[in-house]
Amino acid sequence: MKKSVPAVLEFTSLDRLHGFNCPGLGIRADIVPGKINQLRFTPSKTGSFPFHCDNFCGIGHEGMAGTITVEE
Ligand SMILES: [Cu+2]
């Protein structure tokens, strides 16, 4: 992502309820099966920000994670 550039993150799930949580950027969203959830967000700082699934969803839950990179 680019700092100070508005973006829309879209989430959906093919199986069950998950949760997107990126504490470093202060954003989270429910990820609901069969639905597209939109999260409007404008990053105000640069860096690498880990995110994870915050709704225990079964096997593989621990691996549901990644990093958002915000550049200048
Ligand atoms: Cu999950």
Image (cartoon, helix red, strand yellow):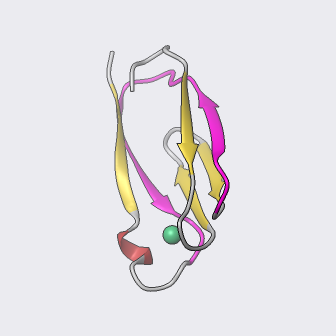
Residue at image coords 66%, 61%:
32
Q: Nearer the viewer, residue 17 or 68?
A: 17
Q: Nearer the viewer, residue 42 or 25?
A: 42
Across and down, in percent, residue 57 comes to 54, 78
Indicate left or right for 32 with 1 as reference: right
Q: Is residue 51 left or right of residue 31?
A: left
Above or below for 24 versus 43: below
The residue range painted magenta reads 34-56
Q: Position of residue 23 (x, y in %)?
A: 53, 48
User: Which one is in front, 29 or 50?
Assistant: 29
Q: Quadrant of residue 8?
A: top right
The location of residue 18, given as percent across then percent down, is 58, 66
Q: Magenta includes 2?
A: no
Is residue 46 shown in magenta? yes
What residue is shown at x 65% (from left), y 60% (from top)? 34
Looking at the rendering, in which quadrant would you find the C terminus?
Answer: top left
